[in-house]
Image: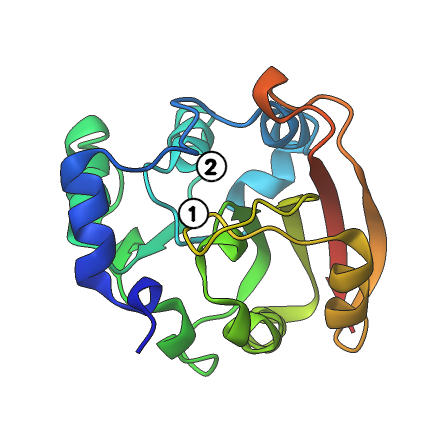
Amino acid sequence: MDKVNQAKFWQQRYETGSIQWDMGQISPPLKAYIDQLPKSAKDQRILVPGAGNAYEVGYMHEQGFTNVVLVDFAPAPIEDFAKRYPDFPAQHLIRADFFELSPEEYQFDWILEQTFFCAITRARRDEYVQQMAALLKPKGKLVGLLFDKEFGGDDIPYGGSKAEYQQRFAPYFNINVMETSINSHPARQGNELFLNLQVK
């Protein structure tokens, strides 16, 4: 089994601080997206899978979003988040493998993608797309960022291209937006695609 499919691999990375792509803050494009949402969105059911340190989840909680679900299968980031946000609903902190979430049990209005796709093995990318579609309610959206570059080497993060993403997502999603992000963090400027996809 590929190491990135194992919770213990990620637990070790968090324990040793080996999460080089962690910006230590909410991603600017996602903050901008969240900030423009109507007040009615604050009750929507939102999933953040492979959330890691979950800066986006923390920000949404601070802004009054009441139904955000954080999923990660390493205990360290979940435990750390719970300490930082002791009033966050415990039932919305789920330690689980994203790929094993049951669509019969979990359905969401939209899902936020932030450095999750780049952390799974390339062999599971189509499975990722299918699971995302299955976990969304009719007309539900997948919103977030994907790297638009190749990094080389065998270690995470894994990169990709717009052409690849279009090919993978098109069978399951209508591509509303998939364009170079104009407000990325300076360290990622020109290397991220903002996406807003709607499940078919």
Residue 65 shows in this picture:
yes
Q: Which mark is residue 65?
A: 2
Q: Which three-letter amino acid code belongs to the residue tagged 2?
A: Phe
Which SS class for mark 1? Answer: strand
Which SS class for mark 2? Answer: loop
Mark 2: give few (<14), some (14-19) or many (20+) Cα within 10 Å: many
Q: Is residue 23 left or right of residue 1?
A: right
Image mark count: 2
- At a point 47% along the width and 37% down the height, the residue shown is 65
User: In this picture, is 103 found above or below 32?
Assistant: below
Quadrant of the image occupied by residue 28? top right
User: In this picture, is 165 found above or below 104?
Assistant: above
Q: Is residue 20 left or right of residue 73?
A: right
Question: Closer to the camera, 79 or 107?
Answer: 79
Considering every residue shown, the one lying at the far front of the view is 153
Q: Which three-letter amino acid code belongs to the residue tagged 1?
A: Val
- At a point 57% along the width and 44% down the height, the residue shown is 151
Q: Is residue 14 left or right of residue 92?
A: left
Considering every residue shown, the one lying at the far top of the view is 186
Q: Which mark is residue 60?
A: none
Q: Which mark is residue 68?
A: 1
Work out which quarter of the rendered image holds the N terminus and state it: bottom left
Pinpoint residue 39: horizontal percent, then vertical percent: 62, 32
Dot 1 and dot 2 residues touching (CB under 8 Å): yes
Question: Closer to the camera, 137 or 155?
Answer: 155
- At a point 21% along the width and 41% down the height, the residue shown is 14
Quadrant of the image occupied by residue 9? bottom left
| CA–CA distance in space, label 1 to label 2 | 7 Å
